[in-house]
Image (cartoon, rainbow, N blue to C red):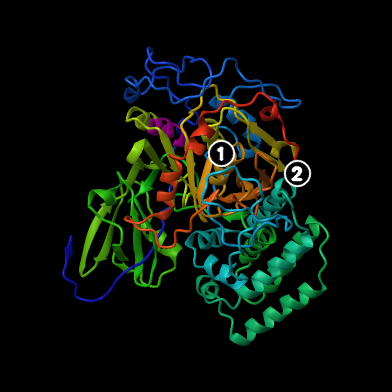
C-alpha cells in the first residue's frame, strides 16, 4: 500500500460524520447466578437471563440491597417505573418529533461548541481542592471563556460548506420565506430565551453585508460585482439597517423581501437572503442553537446511534490534507491497517491540501457500497488504497480492562443509545474478573443523550436526585431521581477533563453531589443546557435549539460552570506511559473514604425523595 515518496505531499484532517441506528436504551443490570447472594440494592427481581459472562459470577455481591422499594415524590405526577418505553414517553416533549421519526431519539445531540457561553452566576465561590477524596462543599467557579469566531469567520466557513451551498442553490424565494418562517416560529415557541425580531434582523443584515466581501461567498455564489459595486451595496444595507425597526414576525418578512430585491437588482442570487436571515437569527441566541444542513444522502440526522456508514476514521485538519486521529474498530480503514498519524493527501485523485474541512469531508462521504480511493503518507512512505464504504458498528465503550489491585477501568466516548447495554456488559465482565472498585473515564466525552445520562447514573445511585431541567414551557421541565431497583455498590471514581461536557457533567454531578464517589481530573466544560433537535419541513435539514437548562442534584445551575473535581490533576502532557490523572484515580479508587461512600446505606431521612423546584 505504501511506497517510497516521490515528493513531500502530505494531508491533514477530517471528521467522518456518523449516522447511528436505534438500540436498546435501558437494560437492567443482569442478576448473578441463582445460588449467589443478591447483588442488588433491593431483593433480586427477575430481569431475564444474565449475559453469558455473568452466569458464573462469583458469590461476592457488588450491589446495594434494601428491604423495600422506594417511592418517588413527583409532585402532581404519578409514580412510573423507568422502563425504556416509560422513560421515553416521559421525556418525549424534549424529542421534538414523532416516535418513528429519525430525529426522535436524538436529544440532546451534543457537539462541543466554540462560541459565547450562556451567562452564569458571577457570585459563586471557588471550590477548595485537596488531594484527599472528600465530599465537595462549595460551588465551582466558571471556566475561562473560550475565544469565539467572528461573524466573518462564520460566514467564510458557511460558504465553504458544500451542504449549505446545495441548500442555497436549490432554494426558491418562496421556499426561503417558508424556511425563515418555520425557524422563527420554532424559536418563538421553544427556545429558552428568544431574542427580539429587531435583534435577529439586524444580525442578519450584518451577516449578509459581510458575506458580500467574503471570498468563499463570492466564489460559490458566483457574484460578478466589482469592488466598487460591492461597497455601494454594503453601504445601502448598512443605511437600511440604521433606519429599520422591526417589531414582529410580519415586519421581519417585509424586511427580508426588501433586502432580496436590493441584492437581486445587483445580480446577486436572492436565495442567500433567507439563509442569512436564518443564520443571523440563530446567531443572536446561545452558542448551542444552530441550523444543521443535510448530508449528501439528504439525511440531516446527527445522532448518537450504534452504527455508521463510511470508511471508519476520525480525522483532523492538516496543512497537507487530513490526519487520521483514530481508526474505528470494525470499519473498512481498520481492515487495511490504516493507523493514527497517517495523512490523507488526496481523495479520488483530487488533492485536498488547504481544502476546508467540510469540503474534504464531502469528498470522502458517500453511500454504502461505493468505493473511494485515498492517497496517504506515513512518515517517509507514500501510498494509496481503495476502500468500500459500508455500515459498521460503533461502540461508545471504547476500553474495558482490569488494573492492579482489583480496580476496573471503563472508558466511555459518548452517551449513545447503546451505552447502557455496553456498560452493563462491561460491568459484568469486570465483576467476573474480581473487580473491587471502578474508575469510569469520561475525559474527552462531549456528552450525548439525556436519557442515557439518566440511565447510567441510575445504575450507580441507590437514591437521590440525578438531574433537573427547566425551560419556558411545562414540556421542558423535568426532575429525574434514582429509581432503578438494583444498583452497583462498587466504589466509584469518575475521571473528567475540560472536554467532558453535557451528559458527562450530569453523570459526574450526580455522583459527586449524592456522595456516591469522587471526581478526579480537571474542571469540566460547563455545558449545562438541553438541546432539542427539530426536523424542518421546508428543507431536508434540522434545527437544534436550546430548550432548557440543567440543574445539579443540589439545584445548582450548571450552564457555564461545570463540575469541579474533588482531586484536581492537570494532565497537560498525557501519554500512553504517563497519565497522572489516571494514576490519581486508581489510587483514589482504593482509598477507604471512597470505599465507605459506596458501601454505606442510604439514609432514610427523605432527602433523596425531594423534587427540586428551580427557576431560570
Comes first in the chain, label 2 or label 1 = 2
Camera-side mark, 2 or 1: 1
Q: 6 or 579, which lies in front?
A: 579
Judge left or right: residue 507 versus residue 372: right
Judge left or right: residue 197 versus residue 401: right
Crowdedness of circle 1 by 10 Å Cα count: few (<14), some, many (20+)? many
Q: Is residue 378 above or below residue 433?
A: below
| Residue positioned most to the left | 4
Magenta region includes residue 417: yes
Asked if disc 2 and disc 1 are in contact, CB closer than 8 Å, the reply is no
- Using the rendered image of the protein, determine whether residue 216 is visible from the camera's viewpoint: yes
Residue highlighted by disc 1: 511
- Using the rendered image of the protein, determine whether residue 448 is visible from the camera's viewpoint: no
Measured as percent of width and height from the top left, residue 387 is found at 26, 53
Mark 2, secondary structure of its residue? loop
Q: 237 or 338, which lies in front?
A: 338
Which numbered marker is on residue 472?
A: 2
Magenta segment main secondary structure: helix
Give the distance between the C-alpha atoms of the residues marked 2 and 1, in whole angstroms. Answer: 28 Å
Q: Which residues are magenta?
A: 416-427
Could you tell me which residue is drawn at 34 percent across and 19 percent down? 55
Measured as percent of width and height from the top left, residue 478 is found at 68, 35
Mark 1, secondary structure of its residue? helix
Could you tell me which residue is drawn at 68 percent across and 79 percent down? 234
Q: 387 or 11, which lies in front?
A: 11
Could you tell me which residue is drawn at 48 percent across and 34 percent down? 595
Measured as percent of width and height from the top left, residue 105 is found at 54, 37
The answer to which quarter of the image holds residue 262 is bottom right
Q: 477 or 366, which lies in front?
A: 477
Amino acid at each position: 500500500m505504501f511506497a517510497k515518496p516521490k515528493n513531500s505531499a502530505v494531508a491533514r484532517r477530517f471528521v467522518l460524520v456518523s449516522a447511528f441506528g436505534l438500540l436498546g436504551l435501558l437494560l437492567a443490570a443482569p442478576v448473578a447466578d441463582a445460588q449467589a447472594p443478591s447483588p442488588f440494592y433491593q431483593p433480586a427481581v427477575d430481569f431475564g437471563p444474565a449475559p453469558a459472562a455473568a452466569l458464573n459470577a462469583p458469590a461476592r455481591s457488588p450491589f446495594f440491597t434494601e428491604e423495600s422499594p422506594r417511592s418517588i415524590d413527583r409532585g402532581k405526577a404519578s409514580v412510573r417505573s423507568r422502563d425504556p418505553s416509560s422513560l421515553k414517553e416521559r421525556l418525549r416533549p424534549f424529542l421534538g418529533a414523532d416516535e418513528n421519526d429519525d430525529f426522535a431519539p436524538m436529544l440532546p445531540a451534543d457537539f462541543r461548541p466554540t462560541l459565547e457561553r450562556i451567562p452564569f452566576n458571577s457570585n459563586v465561590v471557588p471550590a477548595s481542592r485537596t488531594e484527599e477524596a472528600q465530599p465537595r462543599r462549595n460551588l465551582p467557579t466558571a471556566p475561562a471563556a473560550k475565544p469565539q469566531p467572528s461573524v466573518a469567520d462564520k460566514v467564510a466557513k458557511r460558504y465553504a460548506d458544500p451542504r449549505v451551498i446545495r441548500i442555497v442553490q436549490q432554494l426558491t424565494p418562496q421556499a426561503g420565506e417558508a424556511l425563515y418562517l418555520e425557524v422563527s416560529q420554532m424559536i418563538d415557541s421553544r427556545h429558552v430565551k428568544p431574542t427580539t425580531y429587531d435583534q435577529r434582523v439586524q444580525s442578519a443584515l450584518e451577516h449578509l453585508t459581510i458575506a458580500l466581501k467574503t471570498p468563499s461567498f463570492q466564489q460559490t455564489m458566483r457574484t460578478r460585482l466589482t469592488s466598487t459595486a460591492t461597497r455601494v451595496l454594503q453601504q445601502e444595507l448598512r443605511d437600511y439597517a440604521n433606519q429599520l425597526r422591526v417589531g414582529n414576525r410580519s415586519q421581519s418578512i417585509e424586511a427580508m423581501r426588501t433586502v432580496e430585491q436590493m441584492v437581486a437588482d445587483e445580480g446577486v442570487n436572492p436565495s442567500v437572503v433567507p439563509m442569512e436571515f436564518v443564520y443571523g437569527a440563530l446567531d443572536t441566541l446561545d452558542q448551542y442553537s444552530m441550523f444543521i444542513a443535510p448530508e449528501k444522502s439528504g439525511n440531516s440526522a446527527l445522532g448518537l446511534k450504534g452504527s455508521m456508514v463510511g470508511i471508519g476514521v476520525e480525522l483532523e485538519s492538516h496543512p497537507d490534507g487530513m490526519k487520521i486521529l483514530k481508526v474505528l474498530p470494525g470499519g473498512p480503514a481498520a481492515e487495511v491497517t490504516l493507523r493514527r498519524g497517517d495523512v490523507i493527501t488526496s481523495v479520488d485523485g483530487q488533492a485536498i491540501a488547504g481544502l476546508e474541512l467540510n469540503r474534504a469531508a464531502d469528498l470522502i462521504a458517500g453511500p454504502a457500497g461505493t468505493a473511494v480511493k485515498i492517497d496517504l503518507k506515513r512518515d517517509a512512505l507514500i501510498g494509496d488504497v481503495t476502500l468500500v464504504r459500508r455500515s459498521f458498528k460503533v461502540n461508545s465503550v471504547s476500553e474495558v480492562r482490569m488494573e492492579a489491585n482489583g480496580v476496573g477501568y471503563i472508558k466511555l466516548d459518548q452517551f449513545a443509545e447503546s451505552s447502557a447495554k455496553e456498560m452493563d456488559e462491561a460491568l459484568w465482565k469486570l465483576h467476573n474478573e474480581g473487580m473491587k472498585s471502578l474508575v469510569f473515564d469520561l475525559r474527552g466525552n462531549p456528552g450525548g443523550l439525556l436519557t442515557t445520562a439518566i440511565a447510567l447514573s441510575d445504575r450507580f445511585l441507590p437514591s437521590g436526585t440525578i438531574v433537573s431541567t427547566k425551560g419556558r414551557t411545562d414540556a421542558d421541565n423535568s426532575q429525574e431521581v434514582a429509581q432503578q431497583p438494583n444498583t452497583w455498590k462498587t466504589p466509584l471514581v469518575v475521571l473528567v477533563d475540560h472536554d467532558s461536557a453535557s451528559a458527562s457533567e450530569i453523570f459526574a454531578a450526580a455522583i459527586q453531589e449524592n456522595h456516591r464517589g469522587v471526581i478526579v481530573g480537571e474542571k469540566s466544560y460547563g455545558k449545562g443546557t438541553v438541546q432539542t433537535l427539530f426536523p424542518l419541513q421546508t428543507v431536508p435539514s434540522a434545527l437544534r435549539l436550546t430548550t432548557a437548562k440543567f440543574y445539579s442534584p443540589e439545584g445548582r445551575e450548571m450552564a457555564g460552570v461545570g463540575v469541579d473535581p474533588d482531586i484536581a490533576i492537570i494532565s497537560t502532557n498525557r501519554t500512553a506511559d504517563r497519565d497522572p490523572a489516571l494514576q490519581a484515580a486508581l489510587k483514589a479508587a482504593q482509598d477507604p473514604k471512597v470505599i465507605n461512600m459506596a458501601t454505606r446505606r442510604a439514609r432514610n431521612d427523605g432527602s433523596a425523595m425531594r423534587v427540586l423546584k428551580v427557576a431560570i
